[in-house]
């Protein structure tokens, strides 16, 4: 099994284009906090997005935030608290439920699920 760990959007695009051209499925992975849910994927390759982290835009007065897929929720929650804000919902932390570490969820995982 091959794991691709891109550190830029261009590398993600290149990997996806390769997989599409080869007609080979990719497992998309952030920090793996929901990997224990459902049936295991039958793929030979993984696209690990854990290096794509960071808040790229935050305008507290406008309630606008943009972050890369691998950004941990804990980082975003800390930033929001510093400005007296919070999520309008409470993202589920599957770590303890699935026997893993708490606080491993990413913004990409929240939006993908």
Image (spheres, helix red, strand yellow):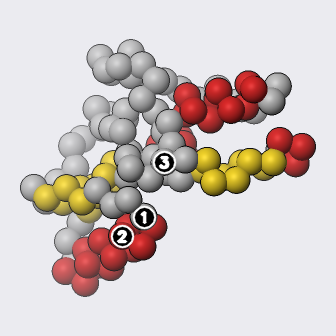
Q: Quadrant of the N terminus?
A: bottom left
Against 12, is 40 above or below? above
Q: Inspect this view and state whether residue 19 appears.
A: yes
Relative side of 78 to 28, left or right: right
Q: Which residue is mark 1?
A: 8
- Left or right, 78 with reference to 32: right
Which residue in the protein does label 2 denote? 11
Q: Residue at 82% across / 25% down in the picture?
A: 84
How many residues crowd mark 3 within 10 Å: few (<14), some (14–19), many (20+)?
many
Q: Earlier in the sequence, mark 3 or mark 2?
A: 2
**Residue drawn at the location 31% of the way across and 20% of the way down:** 100
Q: Residue at x 53, y 53 (%)?
A: 68
Left or right of residue 98, residue 83 in this image = right
Residue 105 at x, y percent in the picture: 46, 33
Give the Cα separation between the discs numbered 1 and 2: 5 Å
- For label 1, the SS is loop
Label 3, label 2: how far apart the Cα atoms are? 14 Å
Please say if the residues under marks 1 and 2 sit with CB atoms less than 8 Å apart: yes
């Amino acid at each position: 099994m091959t794991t691709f760990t891109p550190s830029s959007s261009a590398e993600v695009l290149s990997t996806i284009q390769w997989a599409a051209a080869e007609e080979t499925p990719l497992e998309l992975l952030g920090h793996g906090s929901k990997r224990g849910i459902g049936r295991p994927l039958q793929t030979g390759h993984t696209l690990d997005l854990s290096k794509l982290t960071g808040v790229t835009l935050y305008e507290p007065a406008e309630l606008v935030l943009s972050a890369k897929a691998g950004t941990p929720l804990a980082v975003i929650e800390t930033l929001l608290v510093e400005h007296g804000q919070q999520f309008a919902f409470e993202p589920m932390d599957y770590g303890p439920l699935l026997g893993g570490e708490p606080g491993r969820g990413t913004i990409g995982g929240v939006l993908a699920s």
